[in-house]
Image (cartoon, helix red, strand yellow):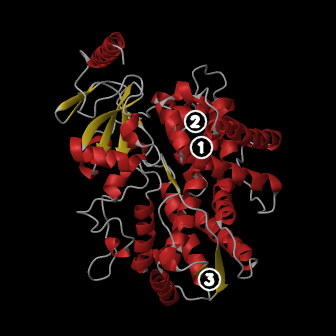
Amino acid sequence: MEPLGTVTLFLGVCLSCLLLLVVVRSRTQGKGRLPPGPTPLPILGNILQLKTNFLSKALEQLSEKYGPVFTVHFGGDPVVVLHGYDAIKEALIDHADVFAPRGPLPLYDKVNKGRGIIFSNGERWKVLRRFALTTLRNFGMGKKSIEERIQEEAQYLLEKLRDTKGKPFDPTFLLSSATSNVICSIVFGTHFDYHDERFRALMDLMNEDFKIFSSPWGQLCNIFPALMNIIPGPHRTLETIVQKMEDFILEATEEHKDTLDPNSPRDFIDCFLIKMEQEKKNSASEFTSENMLMSVLDLFVAGTETTSTTIRYGLLALQKYPEVEEKVQEEIDRVVGRARAPCIADRGQMPYTDAVIHEIQRFISLIPLALPHSVAKHTPFRQFVIPKGTTIFPVLTSALYDSKEFPNPTEFDPQHFLNKDGTFRKSDHFMPFSAGKRICAGEGLARMELFLFLTTILQQFRLKPLQDPKDIDLSPLMSGAGNFPRPYQLCVLPR
C-alpha cells in the first residue's frame, strides 16, 4: 500500500473512533453512567459479538467477562443486558415500576405502532391491560368454566389424533388449532373447525410469524431497522402476514357489530365495542378501533403460538426420554385413571407430571430474552445510572439455566422441580412468563392448558418417534427473540 494511502486509512479510522466517542458521550453525558461492555464499532455497534443466530448464548459469553449487568450496542443504540436471576429480580420485581415500560422492538414496532396491550406504554398500556385482565376473568380465565372449555377442546384434539391411525404426522397444526380455539372462545366467542380453510391459513400465518421472530433475519431487523427495511428477505413478509391476520379480525369485528347486544356481551370483542360506545365522546379514550384490532391480535397470537409451541417442544422431549413419558403415564393412571378426563384439581396430586411440565418450560426457554423493557427515568442501578429510555434486555434463560438452582441445567431433568421426598419443588428462578409488571397476562390460562392438554394426550396415547430417541435433537432450529423448535413427525399409538 502506498504511504499516502496508509496515512489516509489511519486518519479515517481515527476519525471514526473519534466520532463514535463523541456520539457515545453525547448520549450519556449528564444523563448517567452505563454499565461496561464491549467496545462498539461505528454504525455496526457490537454486531460481531452478538451472533444473531444464537443471541442468548452470545450474551451469556459476554456476561462472563463483563458481569451480570453490561451494555451492548444494537447498531448505534446502547442496550443494557440483565444476566442472572439476581439482576433480573432486582430490576423487574424490586424496581418494577421504573423498569415496566416496553422497550423498542423495531421488527414489530412498524406494524403495531404502539397500539394494543403488548407493545404499548404509559396510560394506554395500563388501561388496556386492566381491561383485558378483567374481561378475561369475566369470561372464565382462572375459573371452572375455562377449564371445561379446555377439556372439551382436548377431547376434540383426541379425535383428530385418533384419525392419524398411528401413521406419522406433524403435530404443529393440530396443537396450534387446539390452543387457538381456547382463546378464540374468549375473544371471538367461536369454535373453529380444524378443517376450516381460513382457520388453517391463520394457523400457518402465526407459525410463520413466530419463525421470523426467532430467525437471524428478525434479530438483524431489531439491530439495524433502517438498513433491513431496504434489504430483501423473509423479514419483509411480516407486514403482509400481520395484515392478513388483521383482515381476519376486522371481518369478525364487523360481524359482531351487526349482532351486538350491549346487555349481553358474548366475548372480548363485544366488550370492547361496548366500551368504545360508552367512551365515544371522550377524545382521549384508549378504546379506539385501532387499539381494539391490535389488542385482539395480541391476545389471539399470544394465546395460540407460545402455548402450542411449548406443547410441541414437550412432545419432542418426551420422545427423547421415554422413561419420563412412562413415569407421567403411571402417575396419570394412578391419580386419574382411564375412565375420566384429567382436571386441574388432579395437578396437586401429580407432582411428577407437574415437574415435567415445568422442566419442559425451563429447558426450552421459549422466549429467552423476554420482550425488551426500558427505564421510565434516569435510574440508579447498582453502581451505575441508566439513562431514561435506555432499552433493557432481561435474559430469562440465565435464570432458567442457573446452575446453582438447577444442577446440570443443560440436561432435561424433571428432578429439577422435585424434592427428595418426591413432592413438587417451587423455584423463584422459574420465570418463562417473564416477571414484574410485564409478566404475561395469560400465564394462568397457559399453565392450565399445558397441564390439561399434555395429560389428556398421554392418558390416551403412547408417543412413537420415527428415529432412535438418542438421535433426537432438542436444540432449537433458530434462536433469536424466540426459540423455534426443529420440525418433526411422530406417531401416536392408543394405549
Name above or below for residue 64 compared with residue 449: above
Q: Is residue 242 left or right of residue 89?
A: right
Q: Are marks 3 and 2 in contact (CB under 8 Å)?
A: no
Q: Which of the two discs, 3 and 1, sits closer to the camera? A: 3
Question: 411 or 456, which is in the foreground?
Answer: 411
Extreme-front residue of the structure: 2
Is residue 105 visible in the rendered structure shown here? no
Residue hosting label 3: 461
Q: Secondary structure at mark 1?
A: helix
Q: Which of the two discs, 3 and 2, sits closer to the camera? A: 3
Is residue 389 visible in the rendered structure shown here? yes
Name above or below for residue 252 compared with residue 175: above
Residue hosting label 1: 298
Residue 365 in percent (x, y) is at: 43, 57
CA distance separating discs 1 and 2 = 7 Å
Residue 237 in percent (x, y) is at: 67, 38
Q: Are marks 1 and 2 in contact (CB under 8 Å)?
A: yes
Tell me the tag on residue 116: 2
The amino acid marked with disc number 2 is Gly
Name above or below for residue 132 compared with residue 276: below
Q: Secondary structure at mark 3?
A: strand
